[in-house]
Image (cartoon, coloured by chain):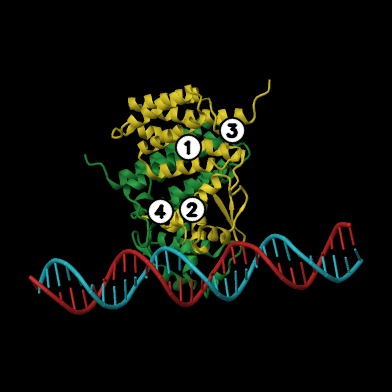
Chain colours: A green, B yellow, C cyan, D red
Amino acid sequence: MQDDALSVRQNSTLSSLLAERIEVSILSGELAAGERINEAVLAKQYGVSRGPIREAARLLAAQGFVEFVANKGAFVREVSREDLLEIYDLRAVLTGHACRLAAKNKGGSLDALKALHHEMDAAARADAPEEYYRLNLAFHDALIALADSPRLAVMLQSLIKEAHLYRQVSLARHPDMAQSNVEHGKILAAIEKGDARAASREGEAHVRAGKERFEAAVAPKKN
Amino acid sequence: MQDDALSVRQNSTLSSLLAERIEVSILSGELAAGERINEAVLAKQYGVSRGPIREAARLLAAQGFVEFVANKGAFVREVSREDLLEIYDLRAVLTGHACRLAAKNKGGSLDALKALHHEMDAAARADAPEEYYRLNLAFHDALIALADSPRLAVMLQSLIKEAHLYRQVSLARHPDMAQSNVEHGKILAAIEKGDARAASREGEAHVRAGKERFEAAVAPKKN
DNA sequence: CAATAAATAACTGTTGACAGTTTATCGATG
DNA sequence: CATCGATAAACTGTCAACAGTTATTTATTG
């Protein structure tokens, strides 16, 4: 353990910190899809022994980032177009459920969501997709928090993370911002009214629309 | 590694085998909820060193069976009544989705499901709740397989497994068998017709009904 | 020169030992 | 006798070395 930043571990464990680091390497493409996770190399790189690396790999496997093959090691998961479509479907259903719960949950405040919605409007007008993308993630996070269902949160976060493994990420990340944010508005309105059924419908529709936007971007209709 | 049965490992890895063993110990109550997983004890018990036990524990943590606390170890997860209700809700939504996919999936055969439905009918008539319970699990497994969505399968299996951690298991396992199987029949009919919307509705309703049967059993209405 | 088999290197799986932290025990003290 | 603090035991976290498996390279042969 010679890396300074790594040695600052508060309540977190070493292997979970390593898992986060490796996750970043995977998402940044530093560790390419299909590539094997070389325990010795990573151990040297992070100045630790192979044990914690192995545990971190198991953690990443649980989150769907890598896949274990007996006696061959851990390999960075490849997410195909079909995988991504499956993920969209599951996200749609679960996001719908999250919105239903959010509508029923009187306790939570909608202020954060409204603010994000507003900011996204500005980002859409300014044609700033990077910014819009960042805010969009935050919006969905806030929505999930409002649903107040820990298992649902884990599932949705896991799906969102896994979607990031799709190689041609850019294709999936430049939606019609204006339209997307109109949908956000519908979700917000339904939640505010406490209309669980409408919230569920709009939440699910929003993700399905995202899926269709992605499909259109990847395989544009020719006619 | 002195345990014979354990040494017979085919394509599976040692830690995953250990995870299965420990899982059985947890579900059987041998390892009680809240109890710490003592690595040294388990290592001795299974005749392996602590490394594989630790990896197995991480695997179980991923599946939601245990929880890690830094420097204290892995603890068997406690599933409260509220947790179980949350699990029911998620299962309802995901089962609905599974049924929708099953209805759309023309490829799969419904024979296995129909056979199980029939057998459950017999079990219900014979008032054999243990048998019914076993068949019910198989029915839901077959349904999940028909949906042909690997991530959905993992999520649902994980929820079903986690539900087994609920202490007063008996309360959750003795539904109104006849009524439950009528609902299975509705699901089957909708899938056979290829009516995705109805299949989804019936699948979701079936699990929600199970939730209500559980709630009634745990906190019976007094009037 | 291509194909195959033996030898070698690289890597994962597993182990036992050591370090650091938490929990339990026991004695001192008010 | 209860409480607090020091001491010891138990346990998790980490490491380096060994064993077994897979992949690669090199030699051999038709």
Q: Are the residues under badges 4 and 3 in a single subunit?
A: no
What element does badge 4 sit on? loop
Find residue A164 and name its label: 4
Label 4 amino acid?
His
Q: Which mark is residue B122?
A: none
**Of callouts 3 and 2, the N-terminal one:** 2
Q: CA distance from mark 4 to mark 1?
A: 21 Å
**Which quadrant of the rendered structure holds the C terminus of chain A?**
top left
Instruction: Give the CA distance from mark 3 to mark 1.
Output: 30 Å
Of the pair A160 and A60, the residue shown nearer to us? A60
Q: Residue at x 45, y 41 (%)?
A: B156
Please name the amino acid that badge 2 sits on: Ala
Residues at circles 4 and 3 in contact by the CB criterion of under 8 Å: no
Q: Return the chain for callout 3.
A: B
Q: Residues within 10 Å of mark 1 (few under 14, many from 20)?
A: many
Single out the mark in the foreground, 2 or 1: 2
Q: Which mark is residue B19?
A: 2
Which residue position holds label 1? Answer: A96
Residue identified by numbered label 3: B171
Provide residue A27's location: percent of width, then percent of height. 41, 59
Distance Cα–Cα, label 2 vs label 4? 29 Å
Q: Mark 2 and 4 residues: CB-CB less than 8 Å, in contact?
A: no
Give x and y (percent) for residue B186.
41, 24
Q: Which numbered mark, 3 or 1, is in the foreground of this view?
A: 3
Instruction: Give me the C-alpha separation between circle 3 and circle 2.
Output: 27 Å
The chain letter under disc 2 is: B
- Label 2 crowd bin: few (<14), some (14–19), many (20+), radius 10 Å: many
> Judging from the image, what secondary structure is the residue with disc 1 in?
helix
Tell me whether the residue at label 2 lies in contact with that at label 1, contact meaning CB atoms closer than 8 angstroms: no
**Which quadrant of the structure image shows residue A181?**
top left
Residue A189's place in the image compared with A23, above or below, is above
